[in-house]
Structure formats: C-alpha cells, structure tokens
Image: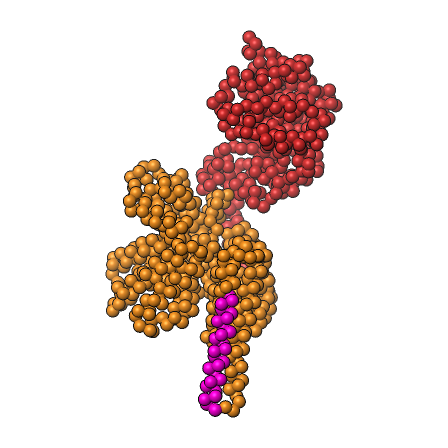
Chain colours: A orange, B red
C-alpha cells in the first residue's frame, strides 16, 4: 500500500476517525497498530527489518543515556576534583563508545538490508533509508542530550514507524514528532483543514503532474543512444519537474495525513526551483534530509568553525554522504560530489558578498540567477535519471554533439507518441502548478491565498480540484504511473 | 471534530453529486466521447470490444430464418466461415470469439435451437486453446457477461456457473442495469476492467477442460434430445503453435470431449507461420475467398461431405463447383 493505492484512503479515513475516539494516553498504541498494518502491506520482511532497526536503536539510546547516568550517580560520592574529572571523562568515553558501537551496528544493518542481503530481500529495503536516518538521528539526539531516551519502546516504535512518513519521509526529529507522541495530540479543526488541503494538493502534484510526466519521458530514456540530444534535454528538464512534483507531492500528503492525526510536521519543500543559488536550493529541497545532514554530519565534522579549507572539505564529505545515502552506484556518488563542488564554488564566489536571493534583489537579476541555479540542479538530475555513469556521459555527449533540434521537432520524437493534446494538457497543469508555487512563495501558503476568497468560491475550487484529481487519476489508471520515486532511496 | 466531519461530508456529498452527473453524462450521446477523452478511456468505447461484437451473433442466433445448420466457433472459425454466409443460405454462420468460452457457445447454440426447431446439424469449430477459455479478467467480462446479460440470455447457464462468474466479476456487476452502464460509459468501463484485473482472480476449473466438458456436453445433450447431429472440429493452426497443442492434448485426453470426439487432435491441419499475422489467425492480406475456400477444402472437405447427409461443400459454396 502506498498513498496512491486505492486502499490507502479508506484505510486512512478509518484510522483518522478511530484515532480521535481513543483516550489521548493510549493513542500511541493505536498509532503503532496502524503503522504495523501499513508496513505489513509491504510484506513481513519489511516489518521484520524495521523491528530490528527499532530494537537496535532503542537499546543503543537507552544504554548511551545509562552510561551518562552512571557518571551522575558517581558524582554524588566524595571525590577529589581530579578524580571527579577523570571519572567524568571515563564516563563520557564510555557513553561515546556505546553510542558509536550502536551507530556502527545500525549503519551495518542498514547496508546489509540496503544491499538486499539476507532474509528481508527487496521488500526489506523499501523506505529503509528514511526510518533508519530517523532512528540514527534519535540516537544522536540522546547522545548530544537534546532529548531523553524514550523508556517506552512502544512509543519509540510508534515514532520510528510513523506510517505517513515511513516510506519517503520527511525525516522526523525526536524533538518534534517523538515529543508529540510522548505528550499526545488533540484534534484541531484548523490543523485538520490544513491537512486536507495539503493532501489534496499533494495528490494533484503526484497524479496530474508527476505521473503524467513519467509516462511522457519514460520512453525517452530507453535506448538513449538512439535519441537526439534535443529529445534527451527535454526529457531531463521534464524529469526535474517530475522529481519535484513526485517528492513534494508525497511530502504534502504525508504532512497532511499527520496534520489530520494532530501532528505538526515541518515543510519538506519550499519552492526549490525558485532558489537563487545552490545553497538556497538546499534550504528548500528535501529540507528534512538537508537539515539532518547539516546537524549530524556537517556540524559534528566541524562545520565552518575550523577555517575555510576544512569547511570546504566538510561540505564535500557531507554531500558525499548524501550521494551514498541516495543509492548504490557511482552515479549517486558522482551526484553528491557534484553538489559538493557546487557548494564550494558557491562559497568561493559569494565570499564577502551578501547571501544571494535577498528580496531586495532586482527581479530580472534574480530571475537569471534562479534560471542558472535551475540548470545546475537539472544537470545533477541527469545523474539521478541515467541508468549508470556511462549513460550520464552518453546523454551529455548527445546533448552537446547530436542535438538535432529540427529533426526532433519534425518527427515528434520528443513526445514519443504521447500525443500533442495530452502534452498540452500536461503543459497547462505544469503552468498552474508553477502559479500555485509562485502564490505560495509570495503569500506564505496557498491556504492564506484561498482564505481571502469567499467561502462559496473556495468550496467551488475544492470541488473543481477534487474532480480534476479524480478524472486525472482515472486518466492515468491502467497505464503505468510511477510509484513514488523517492521510496527507492 | 464534529464540525470538521460535517463540513467534509457536505463537500463530499457535492463532489459525489458532481461525479454522478459526469458519470451519467459519460453514457449519453454528445458527452460520451468528450468525457471518454478527458478520462483517457476513449479506446474503451471506440474499439467496441465485447458486447458490441457478440450481441449481433446472439441476435442472429435468435432470429427467425430458414437455416437448419449452425456453424459456431472462435475467431478463426469466424475468419473462415462468416464471410461466406452469402454463399451458404442454408447455414447460419456465427463464428464469434474464443473469449465467450464454451459456456457462451452453449448459449448461442441453445438460442439457435430454440428459434430453429428444424435444426439438423451443429458444427463447432474451435482451436484447442479456445476449449480452455474460462472466465478470466482480461476479456471475460466484456465477452461472457456483457452481451449475455444485456440480452437476457445469461440465465441459460447453470446456477453454479453463474456463481463462479459472480466470484470473479462481483454479483452487482452481473446486474443488467449495471452491465449496461459499464458498457455505455468509457470511464466506468476503464475503471471497472482495470480494478477487475488488479483485484480479482480468474476462474480456474480443475481439470482445465471442465467448462468445455460441461457446456459442450450440454450442447450434446440438447442435440441428442432434439435429434440434432453435433460435430466438433479443430480450426486450422500454425506451426509455431504445434507444441502448445501437444501440451493441450494431454488435458484433452482425460476430458469427456475425447470420448465424444476422439479424432479431434488428429484432424488439426498446420499451416506455415508466414501465413499468419499472430500465430493464431490467417494473415489479413491472404484472407481472400479463393484462399479461404482452399483452406476449408483442405481442412474440412472430406468430413463435411461425409458426416452430414445434407451438407457438402457443394451445398455450402455452390460457386466453387460451378
């Protein structure tokens, strides 16, 4: 079951109704049960893998904290200052050793399942990346004393396996979601309303944009040696939009579903293609991963506190980790290195200047920068979409030396039998998507824009959007729309 | 919470009303094609597969005419014989499609016998593979439910067969009103057929020829009761299908059919693959009268003359012996 499967909405509706009928002290148990049912729909291998990760990280966090508590107890005893300091250092070392041991075990388990070795097989790897990061982040938070270790393993399991975010994030922090699970949530009309709008918006992005682009460009990337550079360039540009609509759509559905259950999750995307430079892009794209890497990789490495050279090295390492996390294969490592280089180059270029993308920038200047950033990011997506690093070079070579624009337009190979009316419909949908993003960028949220309209107009728009969504879903149904792309990472 | 549920239900009610209106419009003349295009379901109504293809055969079987012989069978039978109808006034040629299954062939035979009390012979021309067809989730609904439910003839089937069909297709979707809605509306047809493929499982009788045994057996019993001769003959086949036919022979040999028609597999005439466009049907470019008549003569010449006192190729195609 995923968010676009027919079974999901009745499943979620039932959970939404029942969840709010249960006394708040027991809701986490019902949430855990819902999570288990959701995960079991991916197969028992997936549930078992998750169980192992949960058990390792829960024990890791408890033991890490306990190692620190031992130090506190001993501090009560009468010791000299020197003895006390030595004892503290030993306890810290022990705490660090426990944390690092469990971190290594978790990472090893992650790679074992990632490489699809062992009993979990393919199902075991579904969504593994996201909840593994969430679990690792929790252990790190306990180690860094940002949060207390959760003594109730069921509450912790409900946090790690939280079904709206388990497949593709957004990656949750112990200071956010876990805190809400601990404290319990209450129904909020406004939050629920926001949740419904977010889910509707997410489904529109996924079904009307991402799935349709997928059908358009999929044939373009088969037999790339036979495709013209122009057709491949068009495919790459569309892939960037597909990836965004797909992943941002997923995130909106996940956040909306969480909102309906009373949880407040942070945005995962903030109009990334409006970014004026690469640094800005990473503040807007997959925010939960970017901030995770910043807090748990970049800053622990020293961040920008140890001089310019170390900062560049740290940036490269952080993006290398990001590349490795995204998948097996050199193409992901190359993609990570590319973004690391973008960051370093961006830092060098912008040294001594104000951060780019200020609202005070001239519109035209900003537009050029946005476009240039978009092209850089799009170049990076070639690494994502191509089958291998060799294919990346082949695509680039064909774009540079076998462009063939005239012939591509004449023979219609760029839309590959998709049909001009369907393409025009898709183009209109992309423009509407862009306008909606623009309004959100300008007013903070689409809901704020809609709330200024009279209720009748607002409701008519909701009905229109829902009707478009249902007809669009029916349009795609029976073809082969993509499942969520990011579920594979 | 109550206010939220109330408002959400209100919006859902409006949305449902809008969708019902759109659905009803999708079955209606001027809106049918535009709504089908909007939902990507135009091929589901324009290609007219299923009900529209089979309904004329049911009507033809039920129609009062002076024929006394019935030719029934799959799409290869149709390719061979239906186009020769004008040359054979005494024979009703309603070769249709394997997808209607032997159960569908039984309904056609029963309908014909009821409307033609003087019936003397029924010829059933089917490929071995056609004998194995059951209620599947690819074409089964369009071919075995739609035409027969819409014409009210589906009741000719045994109650346990209807029950098996209901398990595959869902009881409400066997109701003639619902069937007609699905038949008329592109989006409904697309949605239902895709859901069926995704969530249902085909009927798999054990042994594989159980459905053929049952319904060709029923045709035989009906024929015996009325003094009608029943003949089962294989359609011509192509070399690439020989291995598959051999595999099916094993199933055939343990079926009732082999008792009634022991020479069925021996009669199969194989043609080179070059004469077919899909390994099953004759190449469309080759299917000219002269070629088809040659094939008929090669495959059925002797026994058409031998088995029936009143039927001969000369009767069938007088032009051939002119």
Tell me residue B294's x, y (percent).
Answer: 55, 16
Tell me residue A43's x, y (percent).
Answer: 58, 55
Quadrant of the rendered image containing residue A337: bottom left
Q: Main secondary structure of the magenta part?
A: helix
Q: Which residues are magenta?
A: A80-106
Tell me residue B107's x, y (percent).
Answer: 65, 29
Q: Nearer the viewer, residue B293 or A396?
A: A396
Is residue A94 part of the magenta span, yes or no? yes
Q: Nearer the viewer, residue A378 or A104?
A: A104
> In which quadrant will I find the N terminus of chain B?
bottom right
Q: In this rendering, is residue B205 above or below B239?
A: below
Residue A279 seen in the current view: yes
Tell me residue A374's x, y (percent).
Answer: 32, 55
Q: In this rendering, is residue A230 above or below B123?
A: below
Residue at 35%, 47% in the rendered image: A394
Q: In this rendering, is residue B141 above or below A393?
A: above
Horizontal side of A80 relative to B201 (left or right) equals left
Residue at 47%, 68% in the rendered image: A137
């Amino acid at each position: 079951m995923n968010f676009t499967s027919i079974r999901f909405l009745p499943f979620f509706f039932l959970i939404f109704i029942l969840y709010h009928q249960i006394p708040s002290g027991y809701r986490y148990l019902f949430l855990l049960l819902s999570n288990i049912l959701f995960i079991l729909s991916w197969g028992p291998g997936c549930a078992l893998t998750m169980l192992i990760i949960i058990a390792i990280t829960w024990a890791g966090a408890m033991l890490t904290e306990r190692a620190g508590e031992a130090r506190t107890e001993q501090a009560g005893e009468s010791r000299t200052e020197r003895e006390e300091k030595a004892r503290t250092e030993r306890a810290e070392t022990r705490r660090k050793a426990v944390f690092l041991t469990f971190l290594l075990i978790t990472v090893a388990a992650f790679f074992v399942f990632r490489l699809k070795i062992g009993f979990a097989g393919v199902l075991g790897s579904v969504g593994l990346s996201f909840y593994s990061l969430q679990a690792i982040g929790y252990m790190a938070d306990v180690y860094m004393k940002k949060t207390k270790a959760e003594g109730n393993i069921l509450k912790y399991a409900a946090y790690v396996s939280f079904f709206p975010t388990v497949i593709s994030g957004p990656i949750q922090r112990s200071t956010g979601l876990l805190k809400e699970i601990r404290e319990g949530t209450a129904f909020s009309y406004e939050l629920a309303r926001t949740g419904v709008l977010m889910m509707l918006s997410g489904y529109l992005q996924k079904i009307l944009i991402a799935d349709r682009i997928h059908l358009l460009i999929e044939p373009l990337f088969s037999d790339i040696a036979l495709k013209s550079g122009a057709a491949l360039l068009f495919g790459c540009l569309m892939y960037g939009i597909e990836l965004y609509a797909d992943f941002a759509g997923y995130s909106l559905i996940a956040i909306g579903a969480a909102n309906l259950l009373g949880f407040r999750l942070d945005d995962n995307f903030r109009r990334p293609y409006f970014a004026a430079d690469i640094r800005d892009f990473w503040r807007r794209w997959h925010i939960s991963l970017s901030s995770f890497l910043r807090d748990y990789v970049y800053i622990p490495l020293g961040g920008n506190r140890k001089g310019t050279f170390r900062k560049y090295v740290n940036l490269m390492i952080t993006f290398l980790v990001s590349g490795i996390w995204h998948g097996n294969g050199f193409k992901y490592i190359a993609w990570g290195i590319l973004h690391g280089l973008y960051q370093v180059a961006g830092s060098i270029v912008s040294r001594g200047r104000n951060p780019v993308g200020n609202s005070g920038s001239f519109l035209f200047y900003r537009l050029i920068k946005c476009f240039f950033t978009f092209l850089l990011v799009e170049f990076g997506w070639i690494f994502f979409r191509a089958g291998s690093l060799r294919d990346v070079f082949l695509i680039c070579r064909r774009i540079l030396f076998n462009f063939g624009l005239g012939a591509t337009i004449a023979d219609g190979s760029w839309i590959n039998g998709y049909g001009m009316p369907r393409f025009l419909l898709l183009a209109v949908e992309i423009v509407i998507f862009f306008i909606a993003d623009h309004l959100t960028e300008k007013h903070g949220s689409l809901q704020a824009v809609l709330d200024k309209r009279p209720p009748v107009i607002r409701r008519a728009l909701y009905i229109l959007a829902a009707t478009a969504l249902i007809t669009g879903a029916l349009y795609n149904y029976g073809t082969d729309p993509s499942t969520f792309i990011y579920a594979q990472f | 919470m109550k206010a939220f549920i109330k408002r959400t239900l209100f919006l859902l009610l409006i949305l449902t009303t809008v969708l019902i209106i759109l659905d009803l419009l999708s079955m209606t003349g001027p809106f049918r094609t535009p709504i089908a295009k909007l939902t990507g379901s135009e091929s589901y109504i324009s290609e007219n597969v299923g009900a529209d293809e089979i309904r004329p055969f049911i009507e033809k079987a039920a129609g009062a005419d002076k024929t006394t012989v019935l030719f029934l069978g799959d799409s290869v039978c149709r390719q061979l014989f239906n186009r020769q109808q004008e040359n054979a006034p005494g024979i009703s040629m309603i070769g249709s499609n394997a997808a209607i299954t032997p159960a569908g062939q039984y309904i056609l035979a029963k309908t014909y016998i009821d409307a033609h009390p003087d019936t003397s012979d029924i010829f059933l021309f089917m490929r071995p593979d056609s004998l194995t067809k059951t209620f599947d989730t690819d074409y089964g609904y369009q071919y075995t439910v739609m035409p027969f439910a819409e014409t009210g003839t589906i009741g000719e089937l045994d109650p346990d067969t209807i029950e098996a069909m209901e398990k595959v297709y869902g009881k409400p979707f066997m109701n003639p009103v619902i069937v007609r809605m699905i038949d008329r509306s592109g989006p409904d047809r697309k949605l239902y057929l895709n859901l069926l493929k995704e969530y249902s499982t085909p009927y798999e009788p054990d042994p594989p020829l159980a459905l053929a045994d049952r319904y060709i057996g029923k045709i035989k019993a009906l024929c015996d009761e009325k003094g009608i001769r029943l003949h089962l003959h294989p359609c011509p086949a192509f070399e690439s299908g020989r291995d598959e036919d051999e595999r099916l022979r094993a199933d055939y040999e343990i079926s009732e059919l082999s008792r009634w028609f022991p020479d069925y597999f021996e009669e199969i005439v194989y043609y080179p693959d070059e004469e077919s466009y899909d390994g099953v049907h004759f190449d469309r470019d080759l299917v000219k009268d002269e070629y088809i008549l040659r094939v008929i003569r090669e495959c059925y010449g002797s026994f058409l003359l031998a088995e029936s006192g009143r039927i001969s190729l000369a009767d069938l195609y007088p032009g051939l012996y002119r």
